[in-house]
Image (cartoon, rainbow, N blue to C red):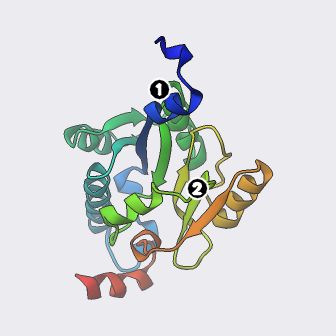
């Protein structure tokens, strides 16, 4: 039987090879809001260690694509067996759009975008994000404040306009509704607890 004669559902299932997409800022620019309690070298080291943790968890679950303009981050990704894409677009959303376009051209789906600074993240959190209920094409992992998006599941790379930034959880929900897509917000501590401000440090240290 020729490939084109297969039922469409079979073809979709055959191509369902999930990818976890991790965007990474240059390490030297990371964690700037911790400047009051950590010097530049310490912040850079923290950004590297957080990325290494997220990358290690992601590699347990699916193929991984790292997009960054930081050559060290790309080298670290390749060393771990992940795909690496040099960022050529300025800004977080454009860089992610560049990576999603690449995955779309590779016929890779679904895609899970995950923040690189989730210290409590584990593989089970990622598996939960890659197992949406029937009829759900978009899943959003909100931050602890319920305002931001720390992880975003897309059934296909091209189904949603990205709105990362202030108020992104609600913005992504609106985009999903506008596109007529089933959407679910998921709350798990490993996905919600990022490390951005000094107030986050005591909680992290208490779990160390």
Q: Which mark is residue 134?
A: 2
Residue, far left: 79
Query: In the image shown, does 1 or 23 lie closer to the viewer?
Result: 1
Q: In the displayed image of the protein, which residue is found farthest to the front?
A: 1
Q: Residue furthest right?
A: 178
Q: Is 59 located above or below residue 95 in the figure?
A: below
What residue is disc 1 on? 106
Q: Which residue corresponds to the image point at 40% horizontal and 72% vertical from the top-left?
A: 195
Q: Write the residue at 49% across / 45% down.
A: 111
Q: CA distance from mark 1 to mark 2?
A: 25 Å
Q: Which mark is residue 26?
A: none
Circle 2: element type: loop
Please provide percent x and percent y for residue 138.
Answer: 61, 54
Left or right of 148: which side holds 37? left
Name the image quarter holding residue 205: bottom left
Considering only order in the chain, which callout, 2 or 1, is on the residue closer to the N terminus?
1
**What is the secondary structure assignment of the residue under circle 1?**
loop
| Res. 201 visible in picture | yes
Q: Is residue 35 visible?
A: no
Left or right: residue 136 compared with residue 34: right
Task: Tell me what residue is drawn at x 56 percent, y 26 percent.
Answer: 7
């Amino acid at each position: 039987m020729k490939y084109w004669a297969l039922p469409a559902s079979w073809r979709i299932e055959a191509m369902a090879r999930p990818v976890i997409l991790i965007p990474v800022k240059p390490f030297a620019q990371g964690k700037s809001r911790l400047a009051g309690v950590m010097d530049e070298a310490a912040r850079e080291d923290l950004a590297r260690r957080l990325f290494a943790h997220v990358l290690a968890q992601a590699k347990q679950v699916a193929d991984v694509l790292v997009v960054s303009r930081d050559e060290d981050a790309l080298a670290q990704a390749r060393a771990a067996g992940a795909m690496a894409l040099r960022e050529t677009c300025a800004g977080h959303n454009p860089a992610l759009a560049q990576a999603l376009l690449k995955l779309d051209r590779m016929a890779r789906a679904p895609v899970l975008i995950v923040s690189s600074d989730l210290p409590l993240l584990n593989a089970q959190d990622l598996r939960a994000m890659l197992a949406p209920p029937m009829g759900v094409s978009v899943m959003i992992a909100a931050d602890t404040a319920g305002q931001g998006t720390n992880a975003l599941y897309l059934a296909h790379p091209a189904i949603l306009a990205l709105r990362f930034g202030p108020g992104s959880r609600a913005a992504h929900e609106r985009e999903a509704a506008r596109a007529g897509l089933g959407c679910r917000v998921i709350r798990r501590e490993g996905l919600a607890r990022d490390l951005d401000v000094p107030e986050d440090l005591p909680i992290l240290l208490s779990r160390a």
